[in-house]
Amino acid sequence: MKDTYRHKGLRIKLVETIRSKGIRDENVLETIGKIPRHLFMDSGFITFSYQDQAFPIGEGQTISQPYTVAFQTQLLEIKPHDRILEIGTGSGYQTAVLLELGASVFTIERQRKLFLKAQENLSMLGYKPQFFYGDGYQGKPTYGPFDKILVTAGADDIPVLLKAQLKVSGIMVIPVGGRISQKMIRIVRRGETDYERTEHGTFAFVPLLKGKED
Ligand code: SAH
């Protein structure tokens, strides 16, 4: 599978679509324009790769909608060299976006098949996050604290262990709610025990599940 001029042309259109939906961060838009999303999806879905939609990636999971990826990334205000903990590697597409923005990424996936597939795919494309197979609810305390924490599955509450792994002035973005829809929550750690919480609209994610799965 290659990245052709046709794919590049479709990406330009996709960038204009998500810009028109309100994404303003030029670095994020440029990154979406750069990454070959079709290489993160099963071949059957190639023709849909540059539509602004989520799609199945196997194991009952989905690659997030490009607008949602851009929205979460914009809220995180990524700077080069940020240490980022990502929960829910999935296809690895969001991981690639964070890496393109110059961050160091520590990414956790609980489904073994997706973990192995993302690892193979990202490595093939030259992306080098640190991969972990396990339960993201626990975070990765030995690698923290982190400048940013991104959760790409819907949580029923904000995991306390994750909050504790955020640096002071660090930012966490996490969808919180029920099975059908969640509110996008942004937490800024203002001090040792001081967390500022803001809400940024309604989204629909697959659920954040406890434990890991073979
Ligand atoms: N950003 C990914 C989104 C994948 S969907 C993408 O665009 O491809 C969310 C992912 O979170 C799924 O792959 C799911 O298996 C994973 N997940 C759910 N609960 C988890 C947990 N507790 N720890 C780690 N990963 C989890």
Image (tube, helix red, strand yellow):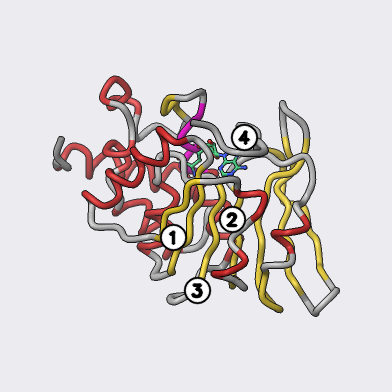
Q: Is mark 2 on a helix, strand or loop?
A: strand
Comes first in the chain, label 3 or label 2:
3
Q: Name the residue under label 3.
A: 82
The residue carrying mark 2 is 150
**Category of crowding for the residue at label 2, using alpha-carbon neighbours closer than 10 angstroms: few (below 14), some (14–19), many (at least 20):** many
Label pair 4/2, CB-CB below 8 angstroms: no
Identify the residue position indicated by label 4 in the image: 205
**Amino acid at the residue labelled 4:** Phe
- How far across and down, in percent of the image, does residue 120 sit? 28, 44
State the separation of the CA atoms marked 4 and 3. Answer: 25 Å
Q: Which span of residues is magenta-colored? A: 61-67
Residue 160 x/y as whole percent: 78, 57
Amino acid, disc 2 = Leu
Residue corresponding to mark 1: 98
In the rendered structure, are the residues bearing label 2 and label 1 in contact, judged by CB atoms less than 8 Å apart?
A: yes
The structure residue drawn at horizontal position 67% and vertical position 67%, both measured from the top left corner, is: 165
Per the model, the C-alpha gap separating discs 3 and 1 is 9 Å
